[in-house]
Amino acid sequence: MKRLQKMIEKWNNKVFAWGAALAFFLSMLPIWYLAFYARPSGDDYGYSALTHAAWMDTHSLIEVLRAAAQTVVNNYNSWNGDWATTFLFSLMPEVFVPWSFWIVPFLMTGAVIAATGVFMYEICVKVMKLPGEDCVIYTALLLLTAYQFIPSTAIGMYWYVGAVHYMLPHAAGLLGIAWMSSWLQTGRGSRLILVAVCAFFVGGSSYFTSLLLLMVFAAVLVLGWNRKRGRVLALLIPFLICLIGFVIQCKSPGNTARGGEDFGFSGSLAVYTVAESLRRGILTIGSYASEKTFSFVMLFVIALFGLESMDRVTEKEKFSFPFPLLFVVAMFGCFSAMFAPEVYSERFDSIGISLGPATVRWFVFLPAAAFTVLYCEGWILARMKRRRAEAGNATGRVLGDGYRFKVLLPGLLLAVLFLLFDREWMRTCVDRQAVEYVASGQAEDFRDQIASQMEILLDDTVKEAYLCPINPEQGPLMHMPVTTDENAFTNWVVKNFYRKDKVVMVEPEDT
């Protein structure tokens, strides 16, 4: 037993970091494998019709960009105000190369993973002074949980327009916050420029991430005013850039067309939105606890490692943990704010709500919850050490040498046992859905049916395209099939993209 204890105590967090990173990488393999079955759908075609035509006619990137700008203008006046993401909507990969859509899931997950890594490294290593391996553990566990229990796999990676609209702004927001922190610490001008670039993109994209970034800007302006006034004042530039972009979004004539004549700002509705968002924040955390218990097990594991991390951080007072209650309220406020755009728009019946908002909230909740746990642990340990110092005792580590053997290892075993007995997470995780979809043969059927359709759609000699039906079982993928109604939205956008006179699905009995 003593030999085992000595061996465990010698393990440093690099071993656990490699294990966590490997677990996350392996968990992404089924998700990435399905990328080769993913196809454009619905709005992917609709927003890219002009750019695809420009590329087919001229093969000029300049003409494509002009067509993208025209798409922004058209949609800004008729449908939606998110001018930055609409520009990207029109640059779907298959505008340029047929059968290139497989790259979309890699791009979308890659952007979020990279942004999360930069954000976590900045906060954990640069601000809190944690070891790099601790940062890797927390980042890998959060990303593994986020993708395995993502509310919408379509929004997360398989639907181009959905992922660009929600996930890319989220990634840009994380980068903006990270570079904002770096600017405050280093004063490097390049960081301020990068913050401004992120603010520009976020301000013209997602209401959710725009609101989050503006809240962070406001908090930094208030809390940092007396400490680094010059650098804080400089952040007014990206703050105004984001705010102006956000206002341009909100003033879009397309919002009125989409939401109805009554759509607009209302003070009473704003007050209701704040109160209702806070209420839904509480209820949603409760639903996560009951429906996504895996996430709370991962937060428990983070707390186990966090005690050691915070013990090291507070040993030499590398980072202080003031006002823990205010920090908890701030994290909850950031999470609850992600309900606000949805709550506000619900008052206008003509605006539909997708799973995009739920997906963004999920990706905001996890790091907010993790940092809440770490911050509270740091405050408790710092307080204990201050009391020791006041009593004239040594202020070194609070945790003894036996922490890993007596607490960490039993805690990890307890987490594993809980997951083994509570197998609901196994039935709902994305990996299982992906593996079952492939193993059932449905994925291969879907690919064969799409190949049959594409053979017709890519044939310029065929002007009236009669397509075979698509397997309705799509697993984690996202596909809006062409219907028997040639005037249906999907038929119309596919027809325009491939420049056909008619696109329609034939009745199953006719095939």
Image: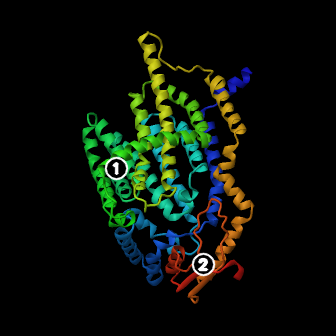
Q: CA distance from mark 1 to mark 2?
A: 42 Å
For residue 459, say whether it is visible. Answer: no
Q: Is residue 407 visible?
A: yes
Q: Amino acid at mark 1?
A: Leu
Task: Give x and y (percent) for residue 19.
Answer: 64, 41
User: Mark 1 or mark 2, which has the lower sequence index?
Assistant: 1
Residue 130 versus residue 440 in the image, above or below: above
- Residue 316, how many percent across, how many down? 44, 24
In the picture, the disc for residue 484 is 2
Give percent across and percent down for residue 136: 55, 41
Residue visible at 57% across and 87% down?
464
Q: Secondary structure at mark 2?
A: loop
The vertical placement of 408 against 446, above or below, is above
> What residue sits right under mark 1 in the picture?
269
Q: Residue at x 51, y 51 (%)?
A: 358
Amino acid type at circle 2 is Thr
> Helix, strand or loop at disc 1?
helix
- The residue that appears at 68% across and 44% down in the rendered structure is 424
> How many circles with numbers are drawn on the protein?
2
Q: Picture quarter containing residue 462? A: bottom right
Residue 13 vs 455, above or below: the answer is above
Residue at far top of view: 392
Camera-nearest label, 1 or 2: 1
For mark 1, does the 10 Å Cα neighbourhood hold few (<14), some (14 to 19), or many (20 or more) residues?
some
